[in-house]
Image (cartoon, grey):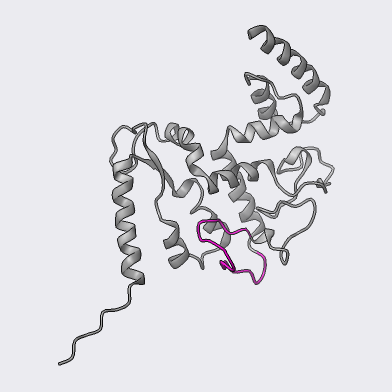
C-alpha cells in the first residue's frame, strides 16, 4: 500500500507542479504538499485547503459579505417553503444576483481557482464560477455544523462551553442563540451580522446532557410564545 501511495503521490505531484501558475496561494501549496494523497490539480488543492480550514473559511465569507453589504431593498423573508434554519443569501435571489463571475454567497468577484482576491492582478473574474471556494466551505459549516464537530472540539480545547468540563465523545454542536430566536428577535439586523448566527460566533460544542437541558428550556420558551393567552375568568 505504501508503494502504491508513493507512486500515486509522485504522479500527482508532477501533475500539480506542471499545472501551477507562477502566482499561487502559498498556504494552499504548503497544505497540498503535506496531504497523505497530494491533490493533482490546483483547483482541487484549493478545495482541500478550505475543507480542512472551515473556521478560516467562515471568517473570510463573513468578511466578504461585509464588504458587499445587503442589496438595496432586500429584507430577510422566509417565503414559500423557507426555513429560519437556512442562512439568508440575498445574492442567490435572481432579483439581486450579480451574474457570472460573482459569488452567490457573498456577492464579491470570484477569481482563478475560486479564490476570493485577485492575486494575479488582471482584474478579471472567472465568468464560469459563481462560488468562492472559501464560501463553499463556509456554507457547509453553516448548514451542517455537526460534520465539523472534531474541528470545533479542538478549537475549544476539548472543554464544554456550558459546564466547563471535559467534552465527551457524545458531545454535540449547539447554537448559543437558537435560530428560532434569531428569526424572531434579530431578523432586522444587517445581513452580514445575521450570518454570524450560523457561523463560529454562535457555535459551541457542549456535552449531550447540557444540550438536552438547553433544548428543553428553549422548547418551553417557544411554547410560551406561541400559546394563546389564557382568557380571564368572568366575575
Residue 208 is left or right of residue 94, and the answer is: left
- Magenta-colored span: 71-89
Asked if residue 226 lies left or right of residue 60, the reply is left
| Image quarter in which the C terminus is found | bottom left
Q: Is residue 99 visible to the viewer in this orientation of the structure?
A: yes
| Whether residue 166 is situated above or below residue 132 in the rendered picture | above
Residue 49 at what x, y percent from top left?
Answer: 64, 32
Q: Quadrant of residue 29?
A: top right
Q: Is residue 217 above or below residue 50?
A: below
Residue 215 vs 37, above or below: the answer is below
Residue at 64%, 45% in the rendered image:
135
Q: Main secondary structure of the magenta part?
A: loop
Q: Is residue 30 above or below residue 120?
A: above
Give yes or no for residue 208 being in the magenta stretch: no
Considering every residue shown, the one lying at the far top of the view is 3
User: Where, quadrant-wise, is the N terminus in this rendering?
Assistant: top right
* Farthest-out residue, bottom: 235
Residue farthest toward the left in the current orientation of the protein: 235
**Taking 32 as reference, is 184 left or right?**
left
Query: Percent from the top left, x then y, of residue 19?
Result: 82, 26
Quarter-wise, where is residue 180 in the image? bottom left
- Residue 169: x, y in percent? 37, 31
How many marks the image carries: the answer is 0
Which residue is more in the foreground, 63 or 178?
178
Q: Looking at the image, which residue is at 76% across and 27% down? A: 41
Q: Is residue 84 left or right of residue 206?
A: right
**Residue at the spot 54% in from the left edge and 48% down from the top edge:** 142
Q: Residue at x 61, y 55 (%)?
A: 66
Question: In the rendered structure, does residue 84 fall within the stretch colored magenta?
Answer: yes
Q: Is residue 25 visible?
A: no
Q: Position of residue 39 (x, y in %)?
A: 71, 25
Amino acid at each position: 500500500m505504501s508503494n502504491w501511495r508513493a507512486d500515486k503521490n509522485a504522479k500527482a505531484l508532477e501533475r500539480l507542479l506542471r499545472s501551477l501558475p507562477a502566482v499561487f496561494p502559498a498556504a494552499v501549496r504548503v497544505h497540498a504538499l503535506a496531504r497523505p494523497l497530494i491533490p493533482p490539480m490546483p483547483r482541487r488543492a484549493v478545495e482541500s485547503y478550505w475543507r480542512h480550514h472551515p473556521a478560516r473559511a467562515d471568517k473570510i465569507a463573513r468578511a466578504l459579505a461585509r464588504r458587499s453589504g445587503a442589496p438595496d431593498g432586500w429584507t430577510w423573508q422566509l417565503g414559500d417553503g423557507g426555513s429560519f434554519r437556512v442562512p439568508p443569501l440575498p445574492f442567490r435571489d435572481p432579483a439581486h444576483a450579480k451574474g457570472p463571475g460573482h459569488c452567490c454567497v457573498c456577492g464579491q468577484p470570484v477569481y482563478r481557482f475560486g479564490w476570493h482576491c485577485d492575486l494575479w492582478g488582471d482584474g478579471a473574474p472567472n465568468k464560469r464560477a459563481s462560488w468562492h471556494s472559501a464560501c463553499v466551505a463556509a456554507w457547509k459549516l453553516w448548514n451542517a455544523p455537526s460534520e465539523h464537530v472534531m474541528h470545533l472540539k479542538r478549537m475549544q480545547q476539548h472543554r464544554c462551553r456550558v459546564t466547563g468540563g471535559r467534552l465527551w465523545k457524545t458531545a454535540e454542536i449547539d447554537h448559543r442563540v437558537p435560530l428560532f430566536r434569531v428569526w424572531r428577535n434579530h431578523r432586522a439586523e444587517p445581513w452580514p451580522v445575521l450570518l454570524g448566527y450560523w457561523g463560529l460566533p454562535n457555535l459551541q460544542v457542549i456535552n449531550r446532557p447540557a444540550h438536552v437541558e438547553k433544548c428543553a428550556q428553549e422548547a418551553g420558551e417557544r411554547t410560551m410564545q406561541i400559546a394563546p393567552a389564557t382568557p380571564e375568568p368572568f366575575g
